[in-house]
Amino acid sequence: MRIEQITLTHVRLPLHEPFRISNGEVSEKDGIVVAVSSDGLTGYGESSPMAGSFYSSDTPESCWRQLTEHLAPAILQQTFSSLDSACEWIGRQPGSNFAKVGLETAMWDLEAQRQGIPLHKLLGGSRDAVASGLAVGLYDTIPQLLHTIQRYTPAGYRRIKIKIAPGHDVDLVSAVRAEFGAIPLMTDANASYTIGHLDIFRKLDEFGLLMYEQPLAGPALEDSAKLQKAVHTPVCLDESLETMADVERAASLGSFRIANIKIQRVGGFRNALRVYELCRKFGLSIWVGTMPELGIGCAQGAALASLEGCDYPTDVEASERWFRDDIIEPWIEVGNGMISLPSAPGLGYRVDDARLARYQVAATVIS
Ligand SMILES: [Mg+2]
């Protein structure tokens, strides 16, 4: 595998509504599209940290620097005997997972195209369609939250996830239960609580939620284990699980029962599959989250969610859920709560150059 050219495009697309979580909000979505050319094929990846560095310390700007100054120029000089050796090389480079993931996932697209199979088959997926869950952010008022959920019910999403934060929790869950009844429902706190808030989670325990996603700070694995012992609802970890060592430690401590695997957070498919296998070994449940990404990253997430151990709906939603426009054709669609996976080789979606040009913040070709 010889890499002939890498094209990097930083794009910024408008969202329908600001995406607000416990510690910040974005009203536009930034992403870096990584196009890797090799042997007459082009593979696509996406680096998609959240702008504003409130999910992690990585930003579109920091990833752009790492990709343009080191990762892309360095990989041009390499020849790889296999996809695995390419991913292994990328993993060893300095830089953040959010920067590496754009390059790493493009290599998987290239390999799937070379083998003439869809990406989800290359990953070992066993489903042709995956269940999708609706995620909604924080709102100023409860009626706004209920209205947003109502708006997306025709798509038949298989579960609802609401964001919570201290002072905005039990009342929100209670209102959603009252309005929508016994729907599959979960919360995501984005690490905004401490073990001192145990009473809140004891109260939330009465609502029969699927899980509490990342209630406590990422490094607070001991406290998370205390919380998990004190409540019936399974704890799901997201921000806590950056490395294999984190997963191993959290599993040994009993800090969680469910893992949210994000391809972006762990730096690519190879690491995502390793985390998946490790969680299976520990008997933990798994599902696939998103940042959310633009179309490329979302299509990758849907492909990963086709693995048989992914037993909760993915956070990947329809393109039209967040975006006024997307960079792929066709858009990702959700019907009856399901996303059909493409049967064409590779990613299975066409990346639209005209849209990349329209939303471009910066672009460079490295060859
Ligand atoms: Mg989360």
Image (cartoon, rainbow, N blue to C red):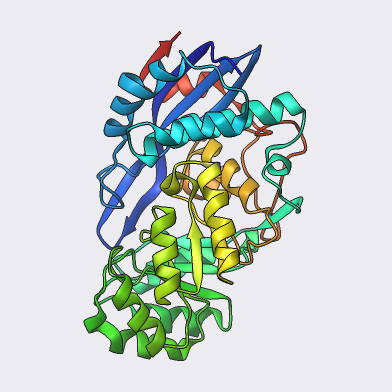
* Residue 252 point in image, percent of width and height: 43, 72
Asked if residue 106 shows in the view, the reply is no
Does residue 169 appear in this view?
yes
Quadrant of the image containing the N terminus: top right
At 46% across and 13% down in the image, what residue appears? 77
Residue found at the very far top of the displayed protein: 367
The residue depicted at 36 percent of the width and 42 percent of the height is 49
Task: Determine whether 198 is above or below 343 in the image.
Answer: below
Q: Is residue 354 left or right of residue 342?
A: left
**In which quadrant will I find the C terminus?**
top left
Q: Position of residue 10 (x, y in %)?
A: 38, 26
The residue shown at (62%, 49%) is: 304
Query: Going by the image, does 194 lie left or right of 36?
Result: left
How many numbered discs sit on the rendered protein?
0
- Percent position of residue 18, x then y: 34, 50
Asked whether 88 or 315 is in front, the reply is 88
Quadrant position of ligand 1 = bottom left
Give how far across and how far down residue 114 sits, in percent.
72, 24
Q: Nearer the viewer, residue 32 or 93?
A: 93
Front residue of 123 and 281: 281
Q: Quadrant of residue 220?
A: bottom left
Q: Is residue 279 left or right of residue 145?
A: right
* Residue 129 against residue 224 in the figure, above or below: above
